[in-house]
């Protein structure tokens, strides 16, 4: 790293360059279209009290940045404040969103490809960020790539995991949760997300919100609810998302469909992430009133 370049700027460049210029960013379709557009990036402190709060809410199995770091490097001398969580949001492409907007039961082919091959891109990007940090002498770990990452049952929330990329993004100032459980970011909810925990000092990204549902019109204004009818199996209601109903649609319904119609082993849905006012931006009431549902920005 050029010593005059701020670490935050350098890390952002590493992440954006990969998505914008690497041939690895591909849906693996005939035209090798890119899987994602340019990502948003945020940083949070390793000692941010939110991470301990997640553990209290989700369950004792939930890992803090300090826990995942110390388990990985077997270094119990590191202090939580020495760590930074680097989080990014790679948004779906315009074509992928436009295709899925037209669907009402199964995922479009581009969406299913983004779920499988796009996540492969995200995994390669995690490894790329780790390698870039390590090359400069910074220890770093991608929580979801560790043996400690697993699915668990949370007493409060049902199916959960030992690390949540969406919650890392929330802590890093990148968005708040919507009625259908997705993270609404400045680039909308049609996206994926990933993170890395590193022993590096980077100023944290301010959180421009004070409530975890602040960008969702249902929670703030009692309006919208457009994601409810988008769900083909009634998994979304005013009470939130029924994870079990959603899961049963993904497996085996969409899995069988993707395999037999698109010719690869995959699954996906994302109907509640497309064709809704928060698809590509933080929604405003006028987006519901003026029926921009089918024409997101
Ligand atoms: S579609 Fe409307 S109600 Fe559903 S998450 Fe988005 S803003 Fe909230
Ligand atoms: S992903 Fe599909 S099945 Fe699951 S809640 Fe959203 S629309 Fe419903």
Image: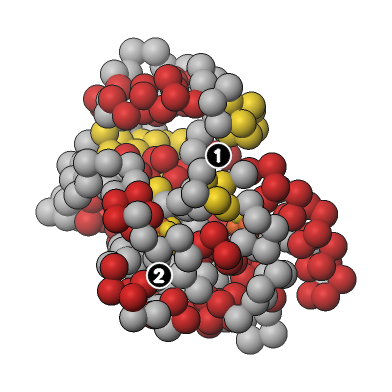
Q: Tell me if I can see residue 111 in this picture.
A: yes
Q: Please, what secondary structure does the residue beneath circle 2 have? A: loop
Q: Name which residue lies at 40% across and 48% down.
A: 177
SS at circle 1: helix
Disc 1 under 8 Å from ligand 2? The reply is no
Q: Nearer the viewer, residue 142 or 23?
A: 142
> Is 214 situated above or below 94?
above
**Residue 197: x %, y % from top left:** 39, 36
Q: Position of residue 91 (x, y in %)?
A: 44, 66
Q: Residue at x 62, y 44 (%)?
A: 242
The residue depicted at 30 percent of the width and 36 percent of the height is 84
Whole-angstrom CA distance, mark 1 to mark 2, is 30 Å
Q: Position of residue 176 (x, y in %)?
A: 35, 49
Figure quadrant, ligand 2: bottom right
Decide: marks 1, 2 in contact (CB < 8 A)? no
First of labels 1, 2 by sequence position:
1
Q: Is mark 2 within 8 Å of ligand 1?
A: yes
Which quadrant of the figure has residue 293? bottom left
**Above or below for 189 versus 1:** below
| Label at residue 277 | 2
Up/down of 147 relative to 252, above or below: above
The answer to whether residue 88 shows anywhere in this view is: no
| Callout count | 2
Location of the C terminus by quadrant is: bottom left
The residue tagged 1 is 144
Tell me the residue at 49%/49% (across/down): 238
- Graded by Cα atoms within 10 Å as few (under 14), some (14 to 19) or many (20 or more), the crowding at tag 1 reads many
Q: Looking at this view, name the residue that lies furthest to the bottom.
A: 31
Q: Nearer the viewer, residue 142 or 294?
A: 294
């Amino acid at each position: 790293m050029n010593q005059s370049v701020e670490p935050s700027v350098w890390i952002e460049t590493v992440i954006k360059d990969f998505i914008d210029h690497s041939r690895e960013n591909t849906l693996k379709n005939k035209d090798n279209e890119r899987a994602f557009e340019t990502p948003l990036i945020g940083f949070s402190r390793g000692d941010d009290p939110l991470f301990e709060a997640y553990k209290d809410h989700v369950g004792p199995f939930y890992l803090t940045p300090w826990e995942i770091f110390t388990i990985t490097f077997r270094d119990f001398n590191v202090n939580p404040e020495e760590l930074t969580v680097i989080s990014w949001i790679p948004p779906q492409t315009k074509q992928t969103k436009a295709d899925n907007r037209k669907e009402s039961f199964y995922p479009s082919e581009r969406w299913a490809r983004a779920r499988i091959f796009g996540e492969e891109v995200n995994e390669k990007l995690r490894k790329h960020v780790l390698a870039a940090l390590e090359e400069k002498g910074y220890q770093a770990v991608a929580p979801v790539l560790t043996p400690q990452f697993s699915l668990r049952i949370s007493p409060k929330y049902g199916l959960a995991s030992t690390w949540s990329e969406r919650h890392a993004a929330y802590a890093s100032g990148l968005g708040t949760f919507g009625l259908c459980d997705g993270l609404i970011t400045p680039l909308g909810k049609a996206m994926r997300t990933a993170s890395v925990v590193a022993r590096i000092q980077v100023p944290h990204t301010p959180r421009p919100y004070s409530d975890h549902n602040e960008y969702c019109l249902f929670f703030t204004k009692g309006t919208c609810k457009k994601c409810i009818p988008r769900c083909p199996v009634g998994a979304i209601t005013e009470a939130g998302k029924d994870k079990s109903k959603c899961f049963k649609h993904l497996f085996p319904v969409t899995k069988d469909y993707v395999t037999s119609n698109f010719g690869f082993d995959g699954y996906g849905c994302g109907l509640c992430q497309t064709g809704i006012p928060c698809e590509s931006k933080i929604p405003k009431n006028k987006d519901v009133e003026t029926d921009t549902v089918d024409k997101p920005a």
